[in-house]
Amino acid sequence: MTAMDSSRRTGRRYDRESKNNAVALAQSGRTVTDVARDLGVSKGSPGHWARGSRNGQPLREPGTLGVESPGQRELRRLRQVVGYVGRQRDILKKALGIFSAEMPPHASR
């Protein structure tokens, strides 16, 4: 089992800085849905973090992240970015296929 498989099974973990950034975006007037979509998190996460922040609860960092070295944290972040970019690429490939199918074939000159 790879690290990616285990993260899918146990859910994603976010460090305190990521949570603070999401809360700040939500408090700046953006909708929780927009924040979640832009950050690639579930819709419930930013809302949960923002409600806790409004109620004076400090944002906690999961224990598994607290023991990560800076290198491990950076590697995890980069893997998340690669996953996001891969999903964006897949969307563009599907769109290209749809538009290519709609285009008439080029006439030979």
Image: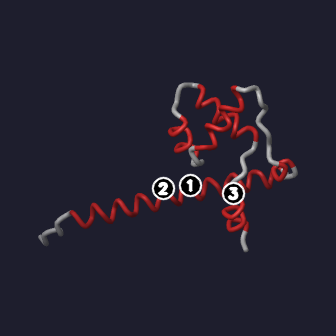
- Say above or below: 70 vs 97: above
User: Mark 1 is on which residue type?
Assistant: Tyr
Query: Which of the 4 image quarters holds residue 12?
Result: bottom right
Mark 1 highlights which residue?
A: 84
* Secondary structure of residue under mark 3: loop
- Say above or below: 8 vs 65: below
Mark 2 highlights which residue?
A: 88
Q: Are marks 1 and 2 in contact (CB under 8 Å)?
A: yes
Look at 51% across and 59% down and name the residue there.
87
Look at 18% across and 69% down and name the residue there.
105
Look at 57% across and 48% down and name the residue there.
40
* Secondary structure of residue under mark 1: helix
User: Mark 3 is on which residue type?
Assistant: Gly
Query: In this figure, which colouring scheme has been used for the structure?
Result: secondary structure
Mark 3 highlights which residue?
A: 11
Q: What residue occupies the far right of the structure in this picture?
A: 67
Query: Which of the 4 image quarters holds residue 6?
Result: bottom right
* Secondary structure of residue under mark 2: helix
Tell how many labels: 3
**Mark 1 to mark 2: distance in Å?**
6 Å
